[in-house]
Image (cartoon, helix red, strand yellow):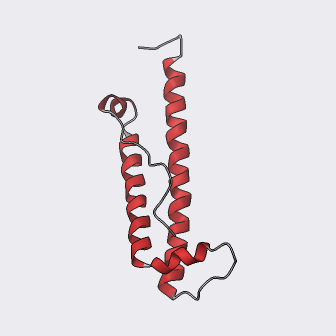
């Protein structure tokens, strides 16, 4: 594994927090996932060898195999958080475009 190349979810502006307060927690969760990825990559440098293109993988210890599973799970959760972020932004833009503003 290598340092994450995924795009981090930005922290929302104060005005955005007023509209969608959950986005602050989503951004913090994404930062936490990034910290997990970096910590496990540092603790298990051998994991970089699991991405070799020649298909030859080193034997991994139990902790290393579990670290791979955690990294896979964090990548999946990070993707879901990004999808959620895009959906919230889309919903907010859709509300802003609504000509029948109830307020």
> Toward which corner of the image does residue 19 lie, by quadrant?
top left
Q: Residue at x 59, y 86 (%)?
A: 58
**Residue at the extreme right:** 54
Q: Position of residue 22 (x, y in %)?
A: 39, 41
Residue lying at the far front of the rendered structure: 54
Residue located 44% across and 79% down the image: 44
Residue at point 53% right, 74% down? 48
| Residue pictured at 41% horizontal, 47% vertical | 26
Direction from residue 58 to residue 46 in the image, left or right: left
Q: Residue furthest left?
A: 14
The percent coordinates of residue 1 (x first, y second) are 52, 70
- Taking the image as shown, residue 89 lies to the left or right of residue 12, namely right
Query: Along the horizontal axis of the image, is 96 left or right of 36?
Result: right
Q: Is residue 93 above or below residue 61?
A: above
The mark total stands at: 0
In the image, is residue 8 above or below residue 32? above
State which quadrant residue 53 falls in: bottom right
Percent position of residue 88, x then y:
50, 35
| Residue ranking furthest to the top | 99
Please determine whether, in this image, residue 53 is positioned above or below residue 21.
Answer: below
Give how far across and how far down residue 102 sits, in percent: 46, 14
| Image quarter of the C terminus | top left
* Nearer to me, 69 or 47: 47
Please determine whether, in this image, residue 88 is positioned above or below residue 48.
above
Which of the 4 image quarters holds residue 16? top left
Nearer the observer, 58 or 75: 58
């Amino acid at each position: 594994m290598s340092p994450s190349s995924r795009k981090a979810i930005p922290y929302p502006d104060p005005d955005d927090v007023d509209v969608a307060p959950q986005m602050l927690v989503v951004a913090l969760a994404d930062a936490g996932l990034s910290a997990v990825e970096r910590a496990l990559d540092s603790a298990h440098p051998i994991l970089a060898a699991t991405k070799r293109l020649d298909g030859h993988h080193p034997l991994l210890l139990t902790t290393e195999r579990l670290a791979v599973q955690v990294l896979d799970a964090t990548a999946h959760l990070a993707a879901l958080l990004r999808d959620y972020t895009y959906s919230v932004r889309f919903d907010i833009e859709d509300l802003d475009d609504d000509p029948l503003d109830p307020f």
